[in-house]
């Protein structure tokens, strides 16, 4: 038996919508057709891809692994379909851009109604986005991960710094009275606090802690939330700590929703790059997105990189 591409597309739709009916609506096919495709794929692979419940299709570990393996490739095929599908009227260019979801929401989302071209956003890790750029599935990425691929160019854009922020109700009198040169007391105070983090970016706390204390944190965050803006919203109405990029906190700090309490002994900084192909028929659209992002970031930081 040979695998059918439509089986994988159906599997991806079920995975992303969580239901057979949702997949059917997304693919414009019947629900029984979705079931047939899934059964065929499970028969082909030899193991169940979902745990079937009354309300939701829950992916098994094998299902999660399969999704990770096929997702980028299917996105690339979908992009090709969009680019080459005949459309009535004037053709609009379609640009694929990858970055973290918080940067999109903070800096780019508000510009979308002004665009005169189609935009497809992809949110994933630096490594995955760079891999997608190398494969041609994305036209522009914002990343701290630079590739040696000679067909790509990475232009330094800005420096992002990790900072320790505290929630509105966090009692800081003891922290402010601490002798910061005594790492033992400082570490103990930090570990006694409530901590927030995201499931997708646990590395930030680990990186900050290792840079300042030469060890990995020996505690787990109290709250794991969907994204960094969830952290900011929680901190704005309660107590707790989090390690976040300074740009993501910019508006919250300006409105006193959170408080920056420490840069660390050794500030953790990373350079963000615009990654793109050396030659692209979408250079005009790419430049438009770059200009929009440049308008949102601190000019002083960009001057340091481009001087």
Image (spheres, rainbow, N blue to C red):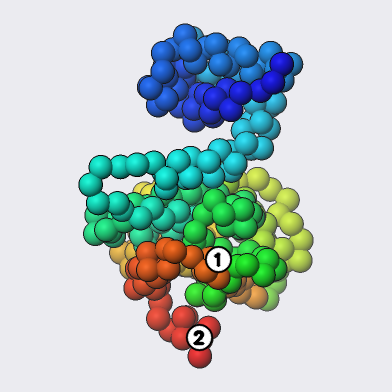
Q: Where is residue 58 in the image (x, y as percent from the top left)?
A: 57, 21
Name the residue nearer the viewer: 276 or 124. Answer: 276
| 147 horizontally vs 158: left or right | right
Q: How far separated are the C-alphas under marks 1 and 2?
A: 20 Å
Q: Name the residue under label 1.
A: 277
Name the residue nearer the viewer: 301 or 260. Answer: 301
Q: Where is residue 221 in the image (x, y as percent from the top left)?
A: 60, 46
- Please tell me which residue is depicted at 47% across the width and 80% down the height of the picture: 301
Q: Position of residue 71 (x, y in %)?
A: 58, 38
Name the residue nearer the viewer: 298 or 141. Answer: 141
Relative to residue 217, is residue 152 depicted above or below? below
Residue 217 visible to an observer of this rendering: yes
Query: Which one is earlier in the sequence, the residue at label 1 or at label 2?
Result: 1
Residue 42 sits in quarter: top right
Q: Please, what secondary structure does the residue beneath circle 1 have?
A: strand
The image quadrant where one finds the N terminus is top right
- Please tell me which residue is depicted at 56% across the width and 38% down the height of the picture: 74
Q: Which residue is at the far right?
A: 215
The image's mark for residue 306 is: 2
Relative to residue 140, is residue 60 depicted above or below? above
| 154 horizontally vs 21: left or right | right
Relative to residue 43, is residue 215 depicted above or below? below
Give yes or no for contact between labels 1 and 2 (Cβ–Cβ under 8 Å): no
- Please tell me which residue is depicted at 25% across the width and 51% down the height of the picture: 90
Q: Where is residue 131 in the image (x, y as percent from the top left)?
A: 63, 54
């Amino acid at each position: 038996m040979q695998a059918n591409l439509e089986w994988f597309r159906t599997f991806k739709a079920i995975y992303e919508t969580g239901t057979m009916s949702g997949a059917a609506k997304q693919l414009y096919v019947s629900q029984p057709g979705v079931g047939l495709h899934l059964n065929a794929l499970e028969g082909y692979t030899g193991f169940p891809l979902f745990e079937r419940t009354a309300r939701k299709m829950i992916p098994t570990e094998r299902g999660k692994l399969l999704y990770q393996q096929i997702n980028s490739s299917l996105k690339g095929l979908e992009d090709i379909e969009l680019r080459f599908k005949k459309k009535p009227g004037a053709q609009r260019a379609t640009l694929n851009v990858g970055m973290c979801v918080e940067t999109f929401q903070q800096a780019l989302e508000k510009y979308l109604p002004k665009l005169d071209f189609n935009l497809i956003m992809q949110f994933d890790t630096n490594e995955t986005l760079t891999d997608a750029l190398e494969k041609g599935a994305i036209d522009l990425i914002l990343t701290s991960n630079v590739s040696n691929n000679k067909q790509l160019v990475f232009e330094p854009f800005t420096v992002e710094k990790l900072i320790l922020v505290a929630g509105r109700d966090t009692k800081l009198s003891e922290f402010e009275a601490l002798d910061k040169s005594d790492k033992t007391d400082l570490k103990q105070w930090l570990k006694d606090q409530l901590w927030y983090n995201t499931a997708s970016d646990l590395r930030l706390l680990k990186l900050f802690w290792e840079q300042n204390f030469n060890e990995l944190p020996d505690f787990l965050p109290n709250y794991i939330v969907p994204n960094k803006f969830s952290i900011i919203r929680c901190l704005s109405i309660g107590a707790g700590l989090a390690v976040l990029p300074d740009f993501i906190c910019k508006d919250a700090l300006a409105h006193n929703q959170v408080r920056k309490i420490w840069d660390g002994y050794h500030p953790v900084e990373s350079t963000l790059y615009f990654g793109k192909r050396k030659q692209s028929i979408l250079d005009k659209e790419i430049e438009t997105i770059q200009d929009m992002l440049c308008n949102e970031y601190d000019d002083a930081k960009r001057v340091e990189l481009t001087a």
